[in-house]
Image (cartoon, rainbow, N blue to C red):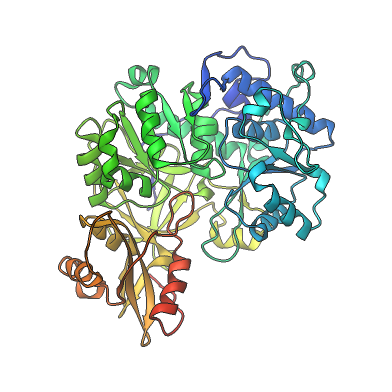
Amino acid sequence: MPWSSRWQVSTPTCSLLDYLFTSSTAVLSGQPILLDADRPEYHLTLHTYREWSKRLAAGLRQRGFKPGDRLLLYSGNTIFFPVVMMGTIAAGGVFTAANPSYVPRELAYQLKDSGAMFLITAEGSLATSLEAAKSIDFPQDRIFVFDDGYNTFDNRGRSVQNISHWSRLLAPPQEAATFEWPTFHSREQMDITTAVINYSSGTTGVPKGVEITHTNYVANCVQTAYMASLAPDYEEKHSTAKLLSFLPMYHAYGQTAHCVSSPSRGTPLYIMRKYDFLKMLAHVQKYRITGLNLVPPIAVALSKRPEVKDYDISSLEAAGCGAAPLGRESVAEFDRVVTKGRFRLRQGWGMTEITCSAIGWDPRLEMDSGAVGELNPNIEGMFVDEEGREVAHGLSGEFWVKGPNVMKGYWRKPEATKETVTDDGWLKTGDIGYRDQDGLIYIIDRKKELIKVKANQVAPAELESLLLDHPAVQDAAVVGVTINGEELPRAYIVLQEQQRVSPQEIAKWLASQVAPHKRLAGGVQMTDAIPKNPSGKILRKILRERAVIEVGDGAVRDSKL
């Protein structure tokens, strides 16, 4: 039988705007909550966050932006990124953001697929935006230039190459003061109204737009807030909390945590416009940051890079890691090297199709470093075999999840939605894992990434976790490659600085710790970097294609349970 979360909590009936700001006119805090990490004098309070959002909403309405219309933001993080998101939603529209590393072809796809009415682009990405727009005949007068936030604050926004500055979309403050966004009085309104379309990473085929409703967003924020509040010292720690944002806000993780959740709790958030490891350490030291939201590559870097000892990061009281699995050994090393007993790194689990997260930790419990936690409030889960039949307790299977934060569906792709969500609301996550006797959940790997070696399944994440435990290894990725008709594991390794170890030594070291079918019979290749998307997920398709060129004799076979 499927099991349910230990907690059931009430989700308020309101729009995402009312959840965050209470109402269009409520008196709000004047304390800084969104601060530029390089120049914190440029910041937003909850009040000014709302007022800037209202200015954009009113200005969009004046330009004919109607309920349900889409706006696409193509930019890295700035303190005004959340404003564009909430202003679009306040206008009754749907917000979508594109990966700022996209090339013209990729941007053009999302721009056309979303049917966006307006495109706001970072100035540094203007050439890409113009090329993308031209390829699909997108009107140039609907493109606007975004800045790093400083010129907008100082009212110095300027046109670039005859493309208007985005501030031209803003209504004057006095006009926006009376603007009111629609309020929701029923759960049905929340359920049917899309707030955001976040595009999936597109590990198979082209990326798909994931429709996230007001219900989805509010429910997920309530779930994670409740889990955090279970800590016995929550009020004390919350009153002094400071966070640092370097996760990309176009991604569900950074967007949910930093555009909505932390502002709704009144927690000061220092926003890095671009991730830089040493700058991150400097900001933690300077601002006495107390909590970090991490992805595996950054967690591993904190454990392994020697520069960490040059900075005082003792202010940290909590850290969570998501977006991709982090092995037990890597978690243990983080706790040993970084936290030093002050706290323990907690993994979570989520995906774009679940708004952000579905699994977290009860902060009152001792944790198992290999688990990702237990179900958040109001969530149901089960593990199933290839036929969709529930597997016995403790056995591995595909994780299915059900709850109020499961997406509305894939944007304009009903067949893909039907393949992913059952008629009774179960989301097929594609992740393989199991649940132990204590109710803790373990995620082993992605179903489509399993390597099949002589009928045995090999999880790349397991081997990567072991490889990261080698003192000479800074980063690692494992993929399957077909050699002489057989699929075999092949590793790509980034060595620590000033380390010298041969591929053969790495393979021999791993062979001593795993069953024969898990050995790196496909070889070991040293490389300068592991290709990853901004959320930290390994771009295995790139490595699989590389492996075929290097040693393979054909396409890697599909892995099955």
> Relative to residue 187, is residue 309 drawn left or right?
left
Q: Position of residue 110 (x, y in %)?
A: 67, 54
Q: Is residue 112 left or right of residue 554?
A: right
Q: Residue at x 48, y 42 (%)?
A: 253
Q: Nearer the viewer, residue 473 or 268?
A: 473
Q: Position of residue 130 (x, y in %)?
A: 74, 52
As drawn, 46 above or below 375: above
Task: Tell me which residue sits at (25%, 60%) in the image.
Answer: 467
Say left or right for 133 vs 300. right
* Picture layout, residue 392 above or below residue 242: below
Q: How many marks?
A: 0
Q: Quadrant of residue 14?
A: top right
Residue 181 visible (yes or no): no
| In the depicted structure, whether residue 199 falls above or below residue 478 | above
Q: Nearer the viewer, residue 51 or 89?
A: 51
Q: Residue furthest front?
A: 498
Which residue does the image show at 44% across and 65% down from the upper left? Answer: 540
Image coords of residue 426 (percent x, y): 50, 53
Question: Which residue appears at 32% of the width and 31% of the height?
Answer: 318
* Above or below, 102 relative to 363: below
| Residue in the foreground of this view, choosing between 40 and 477 | 40
Q: Quadrant of the image for the C terminus?
A: bottom left
Q: Position of residue 473 (x, y in %)?
A: 26, 57
Residue positioned most to the bottom: 484
Q: Nearer the viewer, residue 544 or 348?
A: 544
Position of residue 316 in the picture relative to residue 269 (left or right): left
Residue 145 visible, this orientation? yes
Residue 192 appears in which quarter of the rendering?
top right
